[in-house]
């Protein structure tokens, strides 16, 4: 079993009792308890960051890590990865696959100069803990799922907005997400901003916000409708660009397909919990990281925020996969990255493929 560095601050989850101990109010008993709790916490951190794994190391020790969590949507990888490649700032990139090693992904990483982490245990929380620990130089972590569609400035814009919100000093953000049309929180805001909220509600009912159980999560027709009316994301980005950026504080469980957060937020949370007992009995643990991040955002008073200044796309929720795969085959133009205009050569030279600057105006 690979063992990696587990040093770092303890979690503050134990609150009142630990505060009394560290203030010396329990005397010698508190000292003993403190020592026991320290050992216990360090052992738990070791469990939550330890596994057999293969790591193709191409780290640059950058201050920003982009961690791509691969799950079960290989159909969209050819659509997603070119977008990701075009959107990368100066950063370390690590593609993470929990449970097995995929040769084609490993080859892709080798071609692009990205690191690749494959763990033995099929648990995304454990795999991400290992990834973040290996990239100890990264102060900012961008976590992105394998079914998220980004534009050229999506990731850099998200990092910029995080630092703007933090510097403003009103709140200390836990994590920041872009506006995503197929998301249980931001879809209502997105549809309202582009004038489609009434149309959506006429077909699918009230556009309530929530973390699960809504039409936006479970109804395949809702996912298809949203993509048909908001894709490709470059088109909706132009529409939303006319609005002044806003920060939306999320009061519900947020589907964390693309977020940015600081390393100290992950450390403050005690890292992602790894539910080994559940795995032993075959109980699904997917989404544990998401639940933990949202809970920490509340208990640590470091809120989950969505910025309207940045847009991204989410392919589908699990129950919508079949219908969305059919849509991707029938209408690939909703998902593919637009090609830059080709200038016509008039002087005998080969055409030049131009690139726009794609800057996000704050």
Image: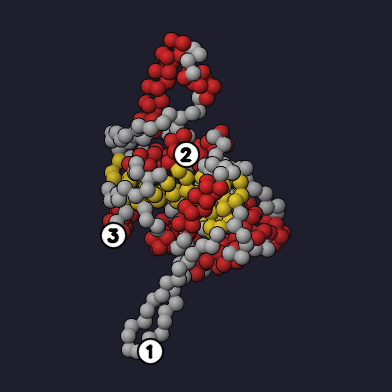
How packed mark 3 is, by other alpha carbons closer than 10 Å (few <14, some 14-19, many 20 or more), is: few
- Check the image and name the residue furthest to the bottom: 347
Instruction: Give the image quarter of residue 156.
Output: bottom left
- Mark 3 vs 1: CB contact within 8 A: no
Which residue lies at the image location 30% right of the left edge and 49% below the top edge? 59
Which residue lies at the image location 58% right of the left edge and 64% below the top edge? 241
Secondary structure beneath dot 3 equals helix
Residue in front for this viewpoint, 56 or 156: 156
Q: Earlier in the sequence, mark 1 or mark 2?
A: 2
The image's mark for residue 111 is: 3
Q: Is residue 25 visible?
A: yes
Residue that carries the numbered disc 2 in the rendered image: 265
Q: Relative to 199, is 64 on the left or the right?
A: left
Which residue lies at the image location 68% right of the left edge and 56% below the top edge? 204
Residue that carries the numbered disc 1 in the rendered image: 346
Instruction: Give the image quarter of residue 84.
Output: bottom left
Q: Earlier in the sequence, mark 3 or mark 2?
A: 3
Q: Earlier in the sequence, mark 3 or mark 1?
A: 3
Query: In the rendered view, would you say 268 is above or below 350?
Result: above
Q: Picture coordinates of residue 323 (x, y %)?
A: 54, 59
């Amino acid at each position: 079993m690979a063992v990696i560095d587990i040093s770092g601050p303890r979690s503050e989850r134990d609150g009142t009792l630990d505060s009394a101990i560290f203030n010396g109010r329990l005397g010698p008993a508190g000292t003993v308890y403190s020592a026991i709790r320290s050992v216990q916490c360090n052992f738990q951190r070791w469990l939550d960051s330890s596994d057999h794994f293969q790591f193709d190391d191409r780290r640059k020790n950058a201050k920003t890590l982009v961690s791509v969590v691969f799950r079960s949507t290989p159909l969209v990888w050819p659509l997603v990865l070119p977008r990701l490649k075009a959107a990368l700032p100066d950063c370390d990139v690590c593609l993470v696959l929990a449970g097995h090693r995929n040769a084609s992904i490993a080859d892709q990483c080798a071609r692009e100069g990205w690191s690749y982490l494959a763990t033995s245990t099929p648990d995304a929380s454990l795999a991400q803990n290992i990834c973040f620990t290996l990239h100890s130089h990264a102060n900012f972590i961008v976590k992105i799922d394998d079914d998220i569609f980004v534009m050229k400035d999506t990731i850099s814009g998200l990092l910029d907005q995080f630092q703007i919100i933090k510097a403003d000093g009103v709140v200390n953000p836990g994590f920041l997400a872009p506006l995503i049309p197929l998301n249980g929180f931001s879809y209502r805001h997105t549809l309202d901003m582009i004038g489609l909220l009434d149309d959506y509600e006429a077909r699918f009912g009230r556009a309530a916000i929530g973390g699960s159980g809504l039409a936006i999560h479970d109804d395949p027709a809702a996912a298809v409708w949203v993509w048909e009316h908001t894709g490709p994301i470059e088109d909706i980005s132009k529409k939303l660009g006319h609005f002044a950026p806003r920060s939306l504080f999320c009061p519900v469980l947020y589907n964390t397909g693309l977020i940015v957060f600081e390393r100290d937020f992950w450390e403050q949370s005690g890292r992602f919990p790894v539910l080994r007992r559940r795995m032993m009995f075959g109980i699904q643990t997917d989404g544990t990281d998401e639940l933990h991040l949202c809970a920490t955002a509340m208990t640590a008073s470091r809120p989950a925020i969505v910025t309207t200044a940045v847009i991204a796309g989410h392919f589908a929720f699990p129950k919508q996969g079949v219908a969305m795969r059919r849509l991707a085959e029938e209408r690939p133009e909703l998902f593919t990255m637009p090609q830059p205009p080709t200038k016509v050569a008039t002087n005998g030279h080969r055409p030049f493929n131009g690139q726009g600057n794609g800057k996000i105006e704050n």
